[in-house]
């Protein structure tokens, strides 16, 4: 059996961390099993869907490296939904209903007022042909409901939640098609999963009830339901489903200098029993991906933690992986010196500018003489090996300075900063001429 998963966003906006996580899990499961990963654009809502959003989603997935093997869109498949509806109508599993939104709302309120679950009363099933004709004569158009089978509980073994058991009589027969002919998500999704031979549906636990309804749709359409994995939702660090998370997308990640692999490393493992690790590629995440490691508690997403993970990953990135994002002229040697000090690859440019100079560094009165001595020492030095060690050893002997008093004025004069990469590694990059010039300028 080829594992086939699908990621099914509505093209009504860009991806955000919540659905990026769902996309990733679908991708990982398919890859782990040598299967296929489908992008399905749920664009039955023609008003809210747009080609710009569809393209945005493709771009987001491409940036993440989660390229789909196939793409389908629901708006190309309306004929299949018509056929399914017709089949279900022929076997009495869908029926027309004529209540207006206001009438349905009133029914719900009455039930809630009596402390009863607001389940649709199936009044439309009682209509006679004559009553239906009268309603249609008045200009009413039907919407269509899927008739749930109340004879047995709906059960499945969820790959994350374990055994699930839902009483269908507590659920309303879902509306599958509106009076204007437009489709609701429920039936098209089941039809697509059948036609595209989807084997695993991986999505958020907000879809658990939909799954119960869809299992009956699969069965009514004579298809075996796929396996389901419903993951606990992602929440913000404050523990709530924050608005911020819902709008935290790829653009925000790029602005924060987050590497795609850092985001993926985080989203692959949060909410699981496996540790979040600074991996270099998707390979180790794929090899270890398994629903058995998923917990039932909401997964907490914290941007500061992600930034920390990102820094650890940046510290390991080889030059070839970042060369096209570095300032021109920056060498592999410079990258390796600067890398341990970065939170993001973008910050490398700041340090490269410091290496290239000029730097702004005026020393205090107490250090001028010392820096003058340092400049003279730098002129005498053999720069071909370990100039920093030679410089500081000589200055220690000639001035008696040690520790901070020895190192800090030199660092400030040479880089304009209080901290940064190892001076021993930085000094050869700045070079003899540049270093002497900076020491003299700071002493002046
Ligand atoms: N378009 C649906 C959503 O984004 C898809 C749910 C599903 O995976 O079936 O919620």
Image: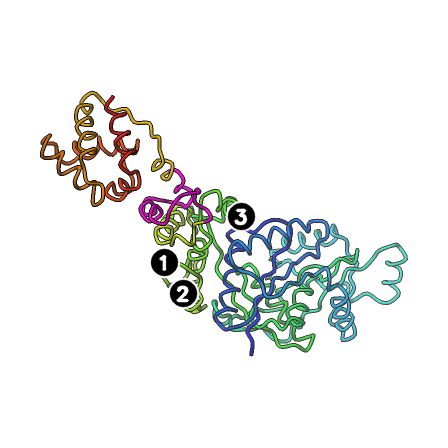
Q: Is mark 3 within 8 Å of ligand 1?
A: no
Q: Earlier in the sequence, mark 3 or mark 2?
A: 3
Circle 2: element type: helix
In this orientation, which residue lies closer to the viewer: 274 or 324?
A: 324
Quarter occupied by residue 141: bottom right
Callout 3–callout 1 Cβ contact below 8 Å: no
- Residue 436 x %, y %: 25, 31
The image quadrant where one finds ligand 1 is: bottom right
In this orientation, which residue lies closer to the viewer: 255 or 161?
A: 255
State the mark number for residue 284. 2
Look at 41% across and 40% down and name the residue there: 349
Q: Earlier in the sequence, mark 1 or mark 2?
A: 1
Residue holding disc 3? 246
Quarter occupied by residue 266: bottom left
Q: Is 349 inside the magenta-drawn segment?
A: yes
Q: Is 36 inside the magenta-drawn segment?
A: no
Mark 1 is surrounded, within 10 Å at the Cα level, by few (under 14), some (14 to 19) or many (20 or more) other residues, namely some
Which quadrant of the figure contains the N terminus? bottom right
What's the magenta region?
324-350
User: What type of secondary structure mainly makes up the magenta span?
Assistant: helix
Residue holding disc 1? 277
Residue 60 lies left or right of residue 407; in this view the side is right
Q: Earlier in the sequence, mark 3 or mark 1?
A: 3
Look at 33% across and 27% down and name the residue there: 360
Visual colour scheme: rainbow
Callout 1–callout 2 Cβ contact below 8 Å: yes
């Amino acid at each position: 059996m080829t594992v086939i998963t699908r990621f099914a966003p509505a093209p009504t906006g860009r991806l955000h961390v919540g659905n990026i996580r769902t996309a990733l899990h679908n991708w990982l499961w398919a890859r782990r099993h040598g299967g296929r990963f489908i992008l399905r654009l749920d664009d039955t809502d023609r008003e809210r869907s747009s080609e710009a959003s569809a393209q945005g989603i493709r771009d987001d997935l491409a940036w993440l490296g989660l390229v789909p093997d196939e793409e389908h869109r629901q708006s190309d498949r309306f004929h299949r939904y018509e056929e399914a509806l017709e089949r279900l109508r022929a076997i009495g599993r869908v029926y027309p209903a004529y209540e207006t939104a206001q009438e349905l709302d009133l029914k719900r309120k009455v039930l809630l007022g009596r402390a009863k679950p607001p389940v649709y009363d199936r009044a439309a099933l009682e209509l006679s042909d004559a009553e239906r004709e009268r309603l249609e004569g008045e200009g009413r158009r039907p919407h269509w409901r899927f008739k749930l089978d109340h004879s047995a509980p709906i059960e499945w073994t969820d790959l994350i939640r374990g055994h699930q058991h839902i009483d269908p009589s507590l659920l309303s027969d879902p509306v599958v098609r509106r009076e204007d002919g437009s489709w609701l998500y429920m039936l098209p999704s089941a039809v697509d999963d059948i036609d595209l031979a989807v084997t695993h549906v991986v999505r958020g636990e907000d879809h658990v009830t939909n799954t119960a309804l869809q299992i009956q749709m699969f069965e009514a359409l004579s298809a075996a339901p796929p396996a389901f994995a419903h993951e606990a939702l992602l929440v913000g660090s404050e523990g709530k489903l924050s608005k911020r998370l819902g709008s935290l997308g790829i653009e925000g990640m790029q602005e924060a200098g987050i590497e795609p692999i850092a985001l993926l490393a985080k989203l692959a493992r949060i909410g699981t029993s496996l540790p979040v690790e600074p991996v270099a590629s998707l390979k180790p995440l794929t090899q270890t991906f398994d629903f058995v490691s998923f917990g039932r508690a909401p997964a907490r997403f914290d941007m500061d933690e992600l930034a920390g993970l990102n820094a650890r990953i940046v510290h390991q990135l080889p030059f070839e992986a970042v060369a096209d994002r570095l300032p021109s002229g920056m060498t592999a040697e410079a990258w390796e010196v600067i890398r341990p000090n970065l939170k993001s690859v973008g910050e490398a440019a700041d340090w490269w500018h410091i290496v290239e100079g000029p730097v702004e560094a005026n020393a205090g009165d107490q250090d001028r003489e010392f820096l003058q001595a340092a400049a003279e020492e730098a002129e005498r030095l053999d720069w071909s090996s370990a100039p920093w060690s030679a410089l500081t050893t000589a200055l220690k002997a000639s001035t008696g300075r040690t520790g901070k008093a020895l190192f800090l004025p030199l660092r400030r004069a040479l880089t304009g900063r209080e901290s940064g990469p190892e001076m021993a590694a930085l000094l050869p990059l700045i070079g003899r001429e540049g270093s002497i010039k900076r020491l003299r300028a700071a002493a002046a």
